[in-house]
Image (tube, rainbow, N blue to C red):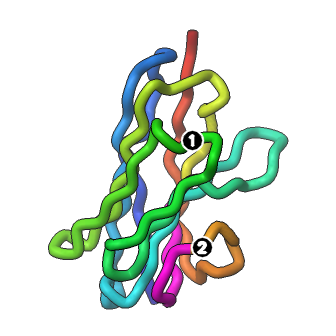
Amino acid sequence: QVRLVESGGGLVQTGDSLRLSCVASGGTFGDYAMGWFRQAPGREREFVSAVSRTGDTNDYTYSLKGRVTISRDDAKNTVNLQMNSLKLEDTATYYCAAGRREYGSSRASDYAYWGQGTQVTVSS
């Protein structure tokens, strides 16, 4: 059983940056591709970014490409999401997910484990 704990969310202003982190425990981190999703109030959960099991392949949703960077540190069992130039529409709860697969995926169903989420609120 893999446990995921996100951190780094908060209240920021438009144009600010945030670095979200997700620490995994209970499994072999290197066996899992990792993903970030987000869900705004009244909206479906949507894919943000993913990184492969080995960290050499990243994927980003088109609307965020250029503003977010995903990275993993296997020595710390951590996956990070650097978000820059934040916009009002980035306000959401951000979730970390782990899937026992080679490459990341934009499909939530490909991830077996999820964190509780960290809230990001962007104000003007």
Q: Name the quadrant containing residue 68.
A: top left
Q: Name the quadrant containing residue 105.
A: bottom right
Q: Secondary structure at mark 2?
A: loop
On screen, 68 above or below 49? above
Q: Quadrant of the C terminus?
A: top right
**Could you say where residue 75 lies in the image, as x and y percent from the top left?**
16, 74
Residue in the image at 31% along x and 90% along y = 28
Q: Is residue 61 left or right of residue 53?
A: right
Q: Secondary structure at mark 1?
A: helix
Give the amino acid at mark 2.
Ser
> Toward the viewer: 35 or 5?
35
Extent of the magenta region: 96-104
Residue in the image at 34% along x and 63% along y = 79
Residue in the image at 52% along x and 74% along y = 104
| 3 falls in the magenta region | no
On screen, 13 above or below 21? above
Q: Badge 2: few (under 14), some or many (20 or more) residues near its Cα, within 10 Å? A: many
Give the amino acid at mark 1.
Leu
Residue in the image at 32% along x and 80% along y = 54
Q: Is residue 99 left or right of residue 88?
A: left
Residue 70 can be seen, yes or no: yes
| 100 falls in the magenta region | yes
First reached walking from the N terminus: tag 2 or tag 1: 1
Alpha carbon of mark 2 to alpha carbon of mark 1: how far? 16 Å
- Write down the residue under mark 2: 105
- Write down the residue under mark 1: 64
Q: Badge 1: few (under 14), some or many (20 or more) residues near its Cα, within 10 Å? A: some
In the rendered image, the residue lying farthest to the top is 124
**Could you say where residue 94 lies in the image, as x and y percent from the top left?**
55, 49
**Could you say where residue 55 lies in the image, as x and y percent from the top left?**
32, 73
